[in-house]
Image: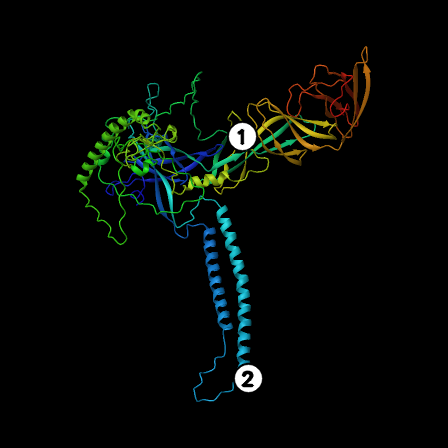
Amino acid sequence: MNDQHSAGGRERSDGPAVPAHPSVLDSVVVYASGAVCRRRARVALPPGGRLRLTGLPQALDGRSLRARVLDGPPGTAVTEARLEPVAELRTPAELPELRAQLDEAREHECAVRERHRLVLTAIAETTALRAVPPQRRRDEPLRRTPADAWLELAEFVDERLARLHGRAGELTRELELAEHETEVLTDRLERSSTAGPVHPVETSATVLLTLTPPHLATDPGPGPGPSADPDAPISPDASDANSNANATNATELDIELEYGVPAARWVPAYRLSYRQGSDTGQLVLRASVAQRTGEDWTGVRLALSSADLDRRTDLPRLRSLRIGRSQPAPPPSGWREPPAGLTDLFAGYDAAGPRPEPRRPVPLPVAVGAAPAAPLMPLAGGTRAADEAPDFLGYGAPPPQPGGPMPAPPMPAPPGAPAPAPAAAPAPAARRARASRSAAASARGAQAGYAEAMAGAGTGARAGGGGAGGLTADTGGERPFAPPAPDAALLDYPALVLAGPEAPAARRGTLGPPSAGRAGEAPSPAASAARALIALPLPRHAVPPRVSAGSFNHRFDAAAPADIPSDGTWHTVTVGEIPLSVRSEYVTVPSVEEKVYGTLVLDNRTAQAVLAGPVEVTVDDEFLLTAALPTLAPGGTQRLGTGVTEGIEVARRTELHESTAGMLNNSTVLDHRVHVELVNRLGRAATVEVRERVPVASEADIRIEERAAWHAPTVPSPECPPSTRLWRVDLPPGGRAELDGGYQIRIPAGKAIVGGNRRN
């Protein structure tokens, strides 16, 4: 039944049934945005050359669907792979338990709400109880109402209201609990995996494969051969086993399906283990992966890539540079005549017989965040191409002739007038012949009319004096004809889509913007899931791989199978270990802060890059902190800060001596002296890097002379600019070191440094 009601190519009811086989997800490659999944299926060779594979997610990208035969009879190949959605009816037992609990909670909430409403109605009715005296006749004297009756009525009302209010309070609390339970179950269902069935009727994706008939060549198999012993006995069991194996290989196929899914992404995360005194460390890559593809990745071979799954490959366009009078660049026409005989291309499709009319979708309100409509081609006079003809590019419908009147829109029917009667439908054969003749005439008219219009576009525009749409003198207010100018979206050739046989006859075989994402259409479930996954907040210190990878792409293969449910949340997966050279060093900048900071110097001596991301640092089996690891290219070196080290003390003192020098005391000498003391109170040796700074002269008559054993950084960086000076000191356990440095600034005697002569 599913084969006859498929949305793709429909099969005849009298044809053979296509066998359906399940497929198993084998491997997944997650890119910076999106993933490529590969499924495998071991199936028997179908007698009719067609089979169907099930188990695919609904959110797959049909453009990326690929199929091939990995193992099977020689000559067997896949000639067509067609994606077909099939509606499936689920029984209540097949729905997840969470969905059943949510339905029960909603029913319980509705029942409690109804009881609460009935109690409130009873309270209102009881409150409205009043003693109504009987209507007195004209000649009847006034009656006395006994007070006991009033008191009994009041007591009855009070007693009933007390019971009803108590019941209303209980129902209010019960209703609050029921609403809370419904909210909790709804949130759990939204966070649960989207792979299982949720609704009683759902649409699943299947792939209809068409195979080439195999070349059934007779293979006698390994015989005795000339060198074999002819007198050796042949076991009948062995011969039967060989024949069965050959028959199995000749009738079984190993098929692989490959497709892309957009709702998947990953970011790197790490765990660094280091022991004091060791020269190496273990950096474990633990990626955070999130996916909402509609299928659970259970026991799959996982690979992670920093490349883009779908990236434009447009070549840069260089424009000519001219010296002289400024001239606007001519806009590209972007138009080419349709090829001759385009209508005959679909003659066989039309001769196959009438096809059932497609179901028209129910108009829905535009969803928030829907993609904008595809731009239409403007026409002369301020109208759009879609308002005048059903074709986008003008390939099918010929444009109006120059000077001809524009076609008037049909007048609306007056209120209350009967609807016009539809024309009688012609016979199928006559309808096909008429459609073929009209399509051919339309295509010929389009080619001739559009070519003529494009040829006379420049003359008409110059004659108007104001470009397209300008009014000419004494024309009766009519606008001269101007050919349609192609929009920027129509010149985006990689994004254009070829119209198939289901398109109108005038648009068949032509290129146009894709129909998906136009105004009034809701986004597809795959696009909605992809947008929701892009908006998912990143973990702390996480960096997208495309940002940290730069101009290079890297791939990481997981060492073990992974399980990632389709719930749209982050899941941590251990990918593998990256050996690094790690050494512990300490850095202090006493001119800014008299504290010593511990750092781990990471050297990547492997051919694999380490992308930026959060790293959990463990030193001597004790968790230290979670820091941000920068990108570490192959052969690169980076520092990772581990916080303040209290076991190493630093102190800094400065002195300034000002004097004059020169033959006529025409120079002022500012002698700055720096004294730094370090004390190591750790139980191990430590290497400390002391960073100081010296001023940089910006004028020729200012000289700076250094006198210290420090040195400038080998490669300046934002952390260590060229004015930085470094000391590297090795302190033994309990050791002490004193560092003396300084510099002299010589300036003219009549000048002073802005901000004061003291630089420290």
Q: Position of residue 445 (x, y in %)?
A: 23, 30
Q: Residue at x 36, y 39 (%)?
A: 206
Comparing labels 2 and 1, the label whose residue is closer to the camera = 2
Tell which of 611 and 667 is nearer to you.
667
Q: Is label 2 in a helix, a strand or a loop?
A: helix
Q: Is label 1 in a helix, a strand or a loop?
A: helix
Say which quarter of the image contains residue 510: top left
As drawn, the label of residue 147 is: 2
- Count residues near mark 1 (Cα–Cα under 10 Å), then give few for <14, some for 14-19, many for 20+: few
Q: Position of residue 465 (x, y in %)?
A: 34, 27
Q: How many circles with numbers are drawn on the protein?
A: 2
Q: Residue at x 77, y 20 (%)?
A: 742
Amino acid beneath label 1: Val
Q: Residue at x 17, y 42 (%)?
A: 427
Q: Position of residue 625 (x, y in %)?
A: 65, 36
The answer to whether residue 67 is above or below residue 316 is below
Q: Position of residue 105 (x, y in %)?
A: 48, 56
Tell which of 277 and 431 is nearer to you.
431
The residue most toward the front is 474
As drawn, the label of residue 547 is: 1
Quick one: label 2 or label 1, which is nearer the N terminus?
A: 2
Q: Is 217 on the left-hand or right-hand side of 681? A: left
The figure's colour scheme reads rainbow
Res. 295 in view: no
Amino acid beneath label 2: Ala
In whole angstroms, how far apart are the C-alphas of marks 2 and 1?
Answer: 88 Å
